Image (cartoon, rainbow, N blue to C red):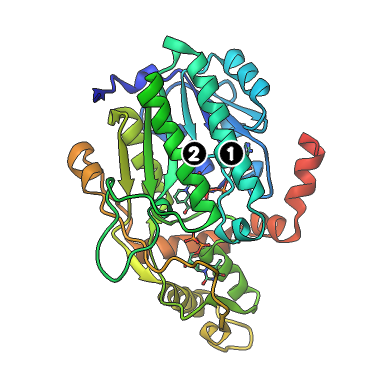
Amino acid sequence: MRTKRKSRQEFKNLLVTGGCGFIGSNFIRYLMANNGFSGRIINVDKLTYAGNPENLEDITRDFPGRYYFEKADICDAAKLTEIFLKYDIDAVCHFAAESHVDRSIKDPGSFIQTNIIGTFNLLETAKARGDKFQLFHHVSTDEVYGSLGAEGLFREDTPYQPNSPYSASKAASDHLVRAYFKTFGLPATISNCSNNYGPYQFPEKLIPLVILNALAGKQLPVYGDGKNIRDWLYVEDHCDAIWTIMTTGNIGETYNVGGNAEIENITIVQMICVILDEISPALNKKPHRELITFIKDRPGHDRRYAIDFGKLHRELGWSPQESFKSGLQRTVNWYLQQKKWVENIKTGAYLSWMKEHYGS
Ligand code: NAD
Ligand code: TYD
């Protein structure tokens, strides 16, 4: 079954889950800034440690009547039904997830709850909307495919072989979305994307962690031999790919999204050190690379990810616009400029602010 989507004007009330996180907040800003979307966005977010309403301060201020926030857990099925009815939801873009591999190794339970049960609840709620419902877009990761050797690329037909509790839970959610399309005819699309970087990324992930540690004169931890490879994509390019799929993709299809930027971790860390040596030299004048520290490898650490995004390029005309070099420079500049955001994250002040405004 392959059905062309009609037109983007159809989305009147788009529910975005996890909109206070890294990619979700960039996506909401991307949609509000341009791209012909004139409907309402309803952001449903539980506000875990990774969700920060400050990421959308400008959107909240600038788009009253078009942007709405609902603090809710996607594991709460009754609350989801209430929200879908309240806003007459006709489309979903589903980002909400526990997203960090290291945390999934220490404490996999919340990954199973949010990524699997939460996705199941959303699918059920969307299905209950019947004909009113236009599209469920599921945002997923290339990590579901497992690890590559020195050669080859992940394609849409690469067998799933997830290696971490995180990627296993995302794989399960992908399968559920596909099953709801096949079995119930729920209009759905899936994207599997490589590693993102850019503004508003929580500093537990490699790039923001290294930037902020280097600025603070702290160790730059590199797992194992530092030669693991990821295929990096600037977050705005990912948002553009998602919107391209949502508006012109074929229902029931999966699209791989990648940056054509395979880089070893150690090279990235060194690149950040070079940028910072130039624009924010250490007070003691020592090169930042002296902070690099090789540490014990992550268990089950996937060696290499690389994406073939040929299908998305050929069928929907998408390709990444930002080069890794300029995207990294932009990202470092952003973290240097956003002193308040960084300070609130580092001190945990954003957590107390969230508690005060939205309860525990
Ligand atoms: P993130 O951790 O920055 O944000 C996740 C958001 O989801 C947070 O705002 C959090 O509060 C919210 N959330 C978590 N559990 C929730 C729940 N039970 N109910 C409601 N909200 C909840 O994640 P991200 O990096 O922005 O990733 C977003 C999505 O993109 C995820 O599904 C992830 O698997 C996928 N993805 C991420 C990358 C990447 O490099 N970051 C790459 C490919 C795909
Ligand atoms: P990460 O940003 O956690 O994303 P993912 O695990 O989803 O790919 O890690 C990116 C790569 O960087 C991965 O190979 C693990 C490595 N890494 C480090 O070497 N040191 C770190 O402190 C972190 C967080 C990651």
Residue 56 visible: no
Amino acid residing under circle 1: Asp
Q: Is mark 2 within 8 Å of ligand 1?
A: no
Judged left or right of residue 120, residue 179 is left
Where is 131 relative to 69, above or below? above
Q: Which mark is residue 187?
A: none
Which residue is at a point 45% across and 45% down the rendered structure image?
Answer: 171
Q: Position of residue 188 (x, y in %)?
A: 38, 28
Ligand 1 rendered quadrant: top right
Q: Secondary structure at mark 1?
A: helix
In this figure, which residue is indicated by the disc labeled 2? 29
Q: Is residue 247 left or right of residue 355?
A: left
2 or 1: tag closer to the N-terminus: 2
Residue depicted at x 37% and y 41% = 191
Q: Residues within 10 Å of mark 2 (few under 14, many from 20)?
A: some
Q: Quadrant of the N terminus?
A: top left
Of residues 252 and 19, the one nearer the viewer is 252
Q: Along the line of sight, which residue is nearer the eye, 117 or 328?
A: 117
Residue reaching furthest left? 314
Residue matched to label 1: 58
Residue 145: image location, x then y, percent: 37, 53
